[in-house]
Image (cartoon, grey):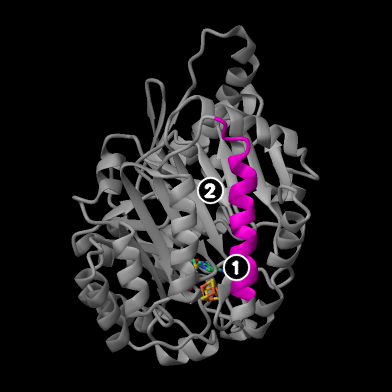
């Protein structure tokens, strides 16, 4: 398969122009717009009972929404707060949620994975974060040596935070950086120097973090290939184990604070593509492997190993080597992903807290998956993670219609095969390095809910 760096840029650019559409990122299938509001809590409760009775450890995601200041590009479920009273109210509600959920975990529950995300979990004062963690771990204890990880904003993360997290068994840390150029940083209201980032990464390592991820974004205002190259050089000198390199999703019609970004400052589509290709070239040349749509990892990282074994999986916490785990989401806006069900909590914190103080579960919307959904979900996830499309096999006649419809979608892939995005194999297709740029486009034909109209609400696929 031809490596991306050997394909002329103008050919890739022509392809992007041809395939330029909007579409989902497929962090879930069915995608969130398909889910139902006022989802019945009964179905969520049934899943809680089931995961407790089957005795298997689960993954737990905890959402902590608060940040110190607003980054103008931010598309996360976050809110700004500098008041201790807000943290107090949130932690009290979070404890109520655990108590309420625990009522349905009649045979108890353990976790083998715990991830804290946000917002900025380390914007919470370290004593309150300790209180939250200890309350959770006492009620849903770790099984074996659980994998515990956290997303942090290095600008607000203190040595006390690192000590606390390390003492509670956290070994992986993911730090947002985005870009190091001062003009870009000013344009997005997020300033942080390379020197301070280096100090932060070194301090994390000193405190026992063996897996360090850094988040970058390309496509931000005032970025260009030259500034981006300088950022990447500096990032490499921090010696991260993993990198996430997200394309900026600009949706000012939905995300009001993104209107603070001047459209005329955004890089042109050609410049944006150039940055994506430069990142691919630069990180692969410097010892990383490309993982899924937007990640890079060192070859000995477990994500790379899982990718080589065809076992990589992706959920709302990101890429994971442990596919097939049931995921319990706690905190406002968090999503639980069970075998045949998605359920999401209320956002922002206030309605989440109100529901809990009334003694009610804060679940607001969700989706129960039928067999067709489950087959397509696995196909799309395998495509996005392991770069293969496998025609599903099943002895169950109930699946015949689904398999027929998937095979029909595959029959439409001839043109993309000619363009070099895929290579036909006996039981499906393998995605080429060129096709890896278009994973969202390749997944869309398998989405039975997607129409041209509904796709328009999503960001650009490349
Ligand atoms: C919860 S934040 C990370 C932790 C912390 N709050 C921070 O910013 O340092 C998750 C990541 O999502 C990415 N992100 C946020 N908004 C985005 C957008 N509009 N487009 C692309 N990536 C985005 C950023 O890379 C960010 O680091
Ligand atoms: S990027 Fe991180 S720190 Fe900035 S507003 Fe979003 S969640 Fe908060």
**Left or right: 420, with 195 as reference point:** right
**Left or right: 269, with 195 as reference point:** right
The disc at residue 75 is 1
Residue range (magenta): 86-106
* Image location of residue 314, percent across then percent down: 45, 45
Q: Is residue 104 visible?
A: yes
Is most of the magenta stretch helix, strand or loop?
Answer: helix
**In front of the other: 175 or 279:** 175
Q: Which residue is mark 2?
A: 440
Q: Give the distance between the C-alpha atoms of the residues marked 1 and 2, in whole angstroms.
A: 18 Å
* Image location of residue 224, percent across then percent down: 43, 81
Q: Residue at x 30, y 71 (%)?
A: 163
Where disc 1 sits, the SS reads loop
Q: Residue at x 22, y 65 (%)?
A: 208
**In front of the other: 62 or 10:** 62
Magenta highlight on residue 309: no
| 331 in relation to 77, above or below | above
Q: Quadrant of residue 43?
A: top right
Any atom of ligand 1 within 8 Å of the CB at mark 2?
A: no
| 66 in relation to 415, above or below | below
Q: Is residue 444 visible?
A: no
């Amino acid at each position: 398969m031809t490596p991306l760096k050997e394909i002329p840029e103008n050919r890739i650019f022509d392809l992007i122009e041809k395939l330029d559409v909007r579409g989902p990122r497929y962090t879930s299938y069915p995608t969130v717009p398909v889910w139902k509001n006022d989802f019945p809590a009964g179905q969520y409760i049934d899943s809680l009972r089931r995961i407790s009775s089957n005795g298997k450890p689960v993954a737990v995601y905890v959402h902590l929404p608060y940040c110190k200041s607003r980054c103008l590009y931010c598309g996360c479920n976050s809110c700004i707060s500098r008041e201790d009273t807000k943290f107090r109210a949130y932690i009290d509600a979070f404890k109520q949620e655990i108590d309420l959920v625990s009522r349905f975990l009649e045979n108890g529950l353990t976790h083998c994975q715990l991830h804290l995300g946000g917002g900025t979990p380390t914007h919470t004062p370290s004593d309150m974060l300790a209180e939250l963690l200890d309350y959770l771990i006492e009620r849903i204890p770790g099984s074996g040596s659980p994998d515990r990880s956290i997303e942090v904003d290095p600008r607000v993360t203190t040595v006390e935070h690192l000590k606390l997290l390390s003492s509670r068994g956290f070994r992986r840390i993911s730090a947002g950086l985005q870009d190091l150029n001062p003009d870009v940083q000013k344009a997005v209201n997020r300033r942080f120097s390379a020197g301070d980032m280096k100090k932060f990464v070194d301090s994390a390592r000193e405190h026992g973090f063996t897996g360090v991820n850094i988040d970058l974004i390309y496509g931000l205002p005032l970025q260009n290939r030259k500034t981006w190259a300088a950022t990447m050089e500096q990032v490499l000198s921090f010696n991260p184990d993993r990198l996430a390199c997200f394309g900026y999703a600009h949706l000012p019609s939905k995300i009001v604070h993104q209107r603070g970004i001047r459209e005329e400052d955004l890089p042109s589509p050609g410049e944006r593509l150039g940055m994506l290709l430069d990142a691919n070239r630069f990180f692969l040349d410097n010892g990383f492997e490309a993982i899924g749509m937007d990640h890079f990892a060192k070859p000995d990282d477990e994500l790379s190993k899982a990718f080589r074994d065809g076992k990589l999986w992706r959920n709302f916490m990101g890429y994971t080597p442990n596919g097939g785990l049931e995921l319990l989401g706690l905190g406002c806006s968090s999503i639980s992903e069970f075998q045949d069900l998605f359920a999401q909590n209320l956002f922002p914190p206030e309605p989440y807290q109100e529901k809990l103080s009334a003694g009610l579960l804060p679940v607001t919307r969700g989706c129960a998956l039928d067999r067709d959904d489950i087959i397509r979900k696995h196909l799309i996830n395998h495509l996005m993670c392991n770069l293969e499309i496998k025609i599903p096999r099943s002895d169950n006649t109930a699946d015949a219609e689904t398999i027929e419809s998937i095979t029909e979608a595959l029959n439409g892939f001839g043109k993309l095969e000619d363009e070099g995005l895929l290579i036909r194999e006996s039981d499906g297709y393998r995605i080429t390095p060129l096709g890896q740029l278009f994973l969202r486009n390749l997944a869309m034909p398998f989405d039975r809910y997607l129409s041209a109209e509904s796709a328009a609400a999503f960001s650009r696929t490349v």
